[in-house]
């Protein structure tokens, strides 16, 4: 039986209320003036005291690697808690929608039909193991062109986030994948990684053999600790930037990167990072190391689904926790139910700050609200503060745009007069989650 993949997978990823128009650019936020936009300002008195025992971290890291390499171990999508039927049903349910191109023109029905015909997947064919060769977008359908839900969304007028419905996520160099199907034009491959499924450029991935898989799995690993680390070839030619949180095999003081061999299969080459750009995986989970990671991502522009090489809220938290050997799913809702958690749904808004002050663990607690996830940094002048990559704050008839990774309180935008009632972050949060469930005495 053959199936076709349809639009809409990107809707499963993290969004923070991006559907409404934005308010005029240039609005100032009191929180961005009041709270230091450097994580070092939130270091505790003992910055090198472990947040978690390193023995526990190693156990978590082993689980991380099992999930990381799962695409090479499975012939279905069970490790993603997905089935092809769920994927196809989801896409079929939204296929009837009208989408628009970047210039606001309706995406023609005949163009959609051609795209469908190019996106045939045969789930009965066993997948082949593969590896990502460079940074690559994961698309809902095999097309690089962006599509939007409305003319207004396509225009991005008034600061509206230009949310490309085909942008699913991004993958990093060296990520294991399962290769399921080639598009009709052979330019795209339908893949599954440890956290995401979709279409990628065929030129960005390669098949692997057993020797390659053994060399990548059965060794010690390194994690990239410098965001946007430059990777160059032996002649110094720039190849790509590598994101913080990339996990790769170690080879002495170097790391092993994949490339396409002459036979079309992946081979390995050795790259030596500059001192401090990579470390043994996982790195010790201390406030000092947490701050080092956060400050590298501070101010990064918001990137829906990894668009333009930037992060959205859940990509940022996932890369952050990867440094410490902690596996997180890709979307914010799933991250909020990873590990232990405390529900705040039935708690009055004015009581939530006190609960966080007494029970949240700085640098190790996630704070969730529908469509958005944040990292708890601790108290500043007695008020809970968070690090998050956010598009902005809703107003009545608009949106005040931030569009980058910042430190704020959970009362961000309280000074804005033209906002809906009960629209502050503190009003909308519903969960405290602890990806490392054993670092505190946590119970509902």
Image (tube, rainbow, N blue to C red):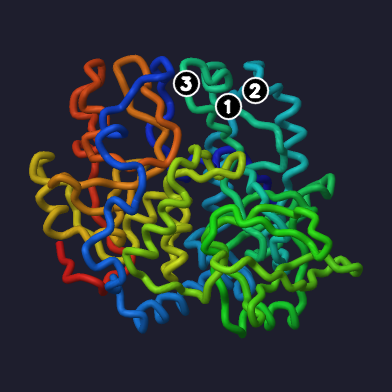
User: In the rendered structure, which disc, 1 or 2, sits on the residue that comes first in sequence?
Assistant: 2
Mark 1 vs mark 2, foreground winner is 2
Name the element at disc 1. loop
For residue 392, the mark is: none
Q: CA distance from mark 1 to mark 2?
A: 7 Å
From what the image shows, is residue 172 above or below residue 440? above
Q: Residues within 10 Å of mark 2 (few under 14, many from 20)?
A: some
Q: Are marks 1 and 2 in contact (CB under 8 Å)?
A: yes
Determine whether the residue tagged by mark 3 lies in a helix, strand or loop. Answer: helix
Residue at screen point 43% across, 26% down: 19
Dividing the image into 4 quarters, which one contains the C terminus? bottom left
Residue 118, how many percent across, how many down? Answer: 77, 42
State whether residue 416 is above or below residue 265. Answer: above
Q: Is residue 91 left or right of residue 255?
A: left
Q: Which mark is residue 159?
A: 3
| Residue 440 in the image: above or below residue 233 | below
Locate residue 410 relative to residue 348 in the image: left or right: right
Image quadrant holding the N terminus, namely bottom right
Point out which mark residue 102 bears.
Answer: 2
Q: Residue 89's spot in the image, x, y percent?
A: 54, 45
Look at discs 1 and 3 and give the one toward the viewer.
Answer: 3
Q: Is residue 1 visible?
A: no
In the picture of the structure, the residue carrying the numbered disc 1 is: 148
């Amino acid at each position: 039986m053959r199936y076709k993949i349809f639009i809409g997978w990107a809707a499963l990823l993290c969004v923070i209320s991006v559907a409404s128009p934005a308010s005029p650019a240039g609005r100032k936020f009191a929180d961005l003036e009041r709270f230091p936009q450097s994580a070092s300002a939130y270091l505790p008195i003992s910055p090198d005291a472990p947040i978690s025992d390193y023995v526990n971290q190693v156990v978590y890291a082993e689980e991380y690697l099992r999930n990381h390499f799962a695409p090479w171990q499975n012939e279905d999508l069970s490790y993603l808690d997905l089935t092809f039927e769920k994927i196809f049903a989801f896409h079929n349910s939204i296929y009837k929608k009208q989408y628009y191109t970047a210039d606001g023109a309706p995406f023609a029905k005949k163009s959609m039909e051609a795209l469908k015909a190019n996106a045939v997947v045969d789930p009965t064919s066993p997948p082949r193991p593969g590896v990502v060769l460079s940074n690559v977008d994961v698309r809902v359908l095999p097309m690089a062109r962006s599509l939007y839900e409305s003319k207004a969304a396509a225009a991005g007028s008034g600061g509206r986030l230009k949310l490309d419905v085909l942008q699913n996520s991004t993958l990093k160099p060296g990520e294991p994948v399962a290769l399921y199907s080639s598009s009709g034009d052979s330019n795209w491959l339908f893949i599954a990684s440890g956290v995401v499924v979709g279409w990628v450029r065929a030129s960005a991935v390669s098949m692997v053999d057993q020797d390659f898989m053994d060399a990548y799995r059965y060794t010690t690993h390194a994690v990239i600790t410098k965001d946007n680390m430059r990777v160059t070839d032996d002649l110094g030619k720039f190849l790509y930037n590598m994101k913080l949180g990339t996990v790769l095999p170690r080879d002495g003081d170097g790391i092993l990167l994949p490339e396409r061999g002459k036979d079309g299969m992946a081979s390995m080459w050795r790259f030596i990072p500059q001192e401090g750009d990579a470390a043994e995986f996982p790195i010790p989970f201390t406030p000092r190391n947490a701050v080092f990671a956060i400050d590298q991502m501070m101010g990064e522009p918001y990137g829906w689904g990894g668009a333009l090489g930037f992060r959205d809220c859940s990509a940022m938290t996932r890369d952050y926790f990867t440094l410490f050997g902690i596996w997180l799913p890709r979307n914010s809702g799933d991250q909020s139910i990873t590990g232990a958690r405390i529900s705040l749904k039935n708690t009055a808004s004015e009581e939530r700050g006190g609960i966080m002050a007494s029970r949240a663990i700085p640098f190790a607690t996630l704070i969730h609200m529908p469509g958005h996830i944040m990292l708890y940094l601790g108290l500043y002048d007695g008020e809970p503060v968070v690090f998050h990559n956010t598009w902005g704050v809703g107003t009545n008839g608009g949106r005040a745009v931030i569009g980058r990774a910042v430190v704020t309180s959970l009362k961000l935008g309280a000074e804005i007069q033209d906002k809906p009632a009960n629209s502050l972050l503190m009003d909308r949060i519903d969960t405290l989650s602890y990806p490392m469930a054993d670092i505190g005495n946590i119970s509902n």
